[in-house]
Amino acid sequence: MDAISQQPIQVTFDYPVLFTDGLFQPDNPTLRQILVRATDFDGPAQVLFVVDSGVHEAHPSLIAAIEAYAAAHADALHLTGRPAVIIGGEASKKDPAVLHQVHQAIHDARLCRHSYVAAIGGGAVLDVVGYAAATAHRGVRLIRIPTTVLAQDDSAVGVKNGVNAFGKKNYLGTFAPPFAVINDVGFLSTLSERDWRSGIAEAIKVAIVRDPAFFTAIEADAPQLVARDAPAMERLVRRSAALHLAHISSGGDPFELGSSRPLDFGHWAAHKLEQLTDYRLRHGEAVAVGMALDTAYAHVQGFLPERDLRRVVDLLVAVGFELLPPELTRTLSETGSGPSVLDGLEEFREHLGGTLTIMLIRGLGEPFDVHEIDRNAMMRSIEVLTRAQDAARSASAARRAS
Ligand SMILES: NC(=O)c1ccc[n+]([C@@H]2O[C@H](COP(=O)([O-])OP(=O)(O)OC[C@H]3O[C@@H](n4cnc5c(N)ncnc54)[C@H](O)[C@@H]3O)[C@@H](O)[C@H]2O)c1
Ligand SMILES: [Zn+2]
């Protein structure tokens, strides 16, 4: 055989994940320092801001603050124009017109590969802007400024972006590390009740998989989290973000070339439920359901003691998640025709490639992979979960009454 020589291609990525408060106060150095410390900095960086409409509505003075910041740091950054506002939430990933809008804005701003797109928003907006930034010129620099709990404690620190297509979640997307991530905890105060809660699911997920002490800490903080205590939320966000980042940087598979995805615990059902509910469920809400289901399954299959199942379900219920949406319970009465949550297994396998790999747990912090799921046992798990949720609700009502 005639072959040209093969050689490894090594590329190193190194991006800061920073925490601050008051990012656009004129004397806050965070953004300025990221730009002027770039190795190729030679005069003001060209920056296009793209803002989530939900953030824009909740923070009406944000755009003026960005413009004032740029004026105060004219030696470090130059706005290519007025910040663009795009629709927030899953609608931004579902509608190809929004992706086009961002590509158009990058084009009109004449950005080059050394210029920056700064995306301010929830996980959905960061995903679509990240995908647009990764594909314009094959990649302009992306600064992520996440504004939801979920985006701060999980999605923004990662290397993925994407949009939905052909009715499938994240069907189009790339692996593209950001240039920097800046978490401003001040954004979280304006979140709706649902979005405040939703991202807690991803923190519970990483705690279940990686850090039982963190799980215990979330159990202890649950009443404060429900009461929207900002310091409790900041603790949760920081530790979850650090665990997610550690997984990406030292987990050995940042671009997910293998089939094992430990931080996608519960996600096969979550992605399918988001689709079956036409995104009525938030990603985090669906993840809470998916984790509860796989935890119940691990118990039904004899891997996980009942007390651990109880702890997981109790915590999810204490934080306020609803674990049995009709799209899940309806699976029990289905006769095999029509879409089912269980179809999510094959779709998950196809998305990851290779053999089906589903992560289960033997205990908190004790994950392991299985390559087959018994559908009948999964059905029984829905029943077990129903009883566990009822028990958790009764216990929490009794606690409140006492
Ligand atoms: N790329 C990844 O690795 C990754 C990981 C996890 C989740 N995700 C994706 O993230 C998305 C979910 O993100 P999300 O949970 O952040 O929800 P979201 O982006 O859908 O935002 C929810 C709502 O909150 C609004 N909003 C955002 N910030 C606000 C603020 N500070 N104040 C008031 N309103 C605000 C938005 O406009 C939207 O209406 C899903 O599409 C999911 O697939 C991606
Ligand atoms: Zn997730």
Image (cartoon, rainbow, N blue to C red):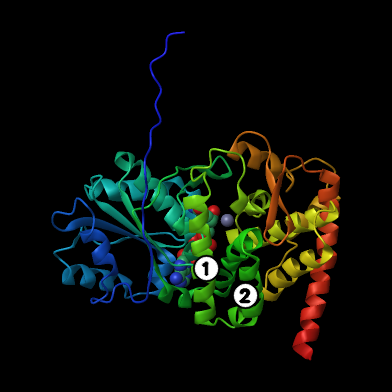
Q: In terms of image quadrants, where is residue 4?
A: top left
Where does residue 297 sit, x and y in percent of width and height?
Answer: 79, 54
Mark 1 or 2 closer to N-term? 2
The residue shown at (52%, 68%) is: 239
Q: Residues within 10 Å of mark 1 (few under 14, many from 20)?
A: some
Looking at the image, in which quadrant does ligand 2 appear?
A: bottom right
Q: Residue furthest top?
A: 1
Pick the residue in front: 302 or 161: 302
Where disc 2 sits, the SS reads: helix
Q: Please determine whether, in this image, residue 165 is positioned above or below residue 120.
A: above
Residue 131 at least partly seen:
yes
**What residue type is disc 2 on?**
Ala
Residue 150 at least partly seen:
no
The residue shown at (68%, 42%) is: 357
Q: Which mark is residue 217?
A: 2
The residue shown at (21%, 72%) is: 68
Q: Is mark 1 within 8 Å of ligand 2?
A: no
Where does residue 72 sit, x and y in percent of width and height?
Answer: 17, 72
Q: Is residue 259 left or right of residue 378?
A: left
Q: Please determine whether, in this image, residue 206 is positioned above or below residue 402.
A: above
Q: Is residue 54 left or right of residue 346?
A: left
Where does residue 153 sit, x and y in percent of width and height?
Answer: 51, 64
Q: Is residue 27 left or right of residue 354?
A: left
Instruction: Determine contact: label 1, label 2, CB under 8 Å.
Output: yes
Q: Is mark 2 within 8 Å of ligand 2?
A: no
- The alpha-carbon separation of the residues under discs 1 and 2 comes to 10 Å
**What residue type is disc 1 on?**
Arg
Where disc 1 sits, the SS reads: helix
For disc 1, the marked residue is: 239
Q: In terms of image quadrants, where is residue 43?
A: bottom left
Q: Please determine whether, in this image, residue 157 is positioned above or below residue 97.
A: below
